[in-house]
Image (tube, rainbow, N blue to C red):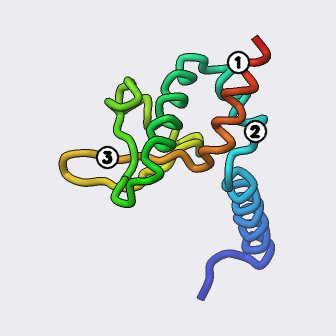
Amino acid sequence: MSRTSPSQHSSRTIILSQTTVQTSSHSGTPQENYVEEFLAKHPDYRKALWLAARSEEESLANPSYQGWQWSDIEMHPTRVLKLVIEGIAKISLRTRRATYYLLKEPELVKTVLKSSVLKK
């Protein structure tokens, strides 16, 4: 038997549904404006994203390519994790010795990097 009244239960449902809507609107692929805003706030990630995109582009012919590591983009692992949290990169493989990453939308990142260079 439930100890909550029907009105308490319905308000709880509303709160949960609002939370679900809010989290689902933040998930998904990053938009071009979002990546531009991220780079505007964190310009030190520009080189790392460029190196990541270059690594992925050079490895297109390699079918066993798992992704790039933090050392490939010259950035500390804790800072690389920010790219994952922000939805720009994803973890493609994690082993006991290393973690490999891939850009979620490499063409979008390349476009943003090229347009930001042209703006300067």
* Disc 2: which residue: 32
Residue shown at 71% from the left, 35% from the top? 111
**How far across and how far down the image is residue 96, in percent?**
19, 51
* Disc 1: which residue: 117
Eyeballing the image, is 10 above or below 90? Answer: below
- Give neighbour class at mark 2: few <14, some 14-19, many 20+ (Cα, 10 Å): some
- Give neighbour class at mark 3: few <14, some 14-19, many 20+ (Cα, 10 Å): some
- Quadrant including the N terminus: bottom right
Drawn side of residue 92 relative to residue 85, left or right: left
Q: CB of mark 1 within 8 Å of CB of mark 2?
A: no
Residue 16 versus residue 112: which sits nearer the camera?
Answer: 112
Helix, strand or loop status at disc 2:
helix
Eyeballing the image, is 76 above or below 30? Answer: above
Amino acid carrying label 3: it is Thr
The earlier-in-sequence mark between 3 and 2 is 2
The earlier-in-sequence mark between 1 and 2 is 2
Closest to the camera, between mark 1 and mark 2, is 1
Q: Quadrant of residue 92?
A: bottom left
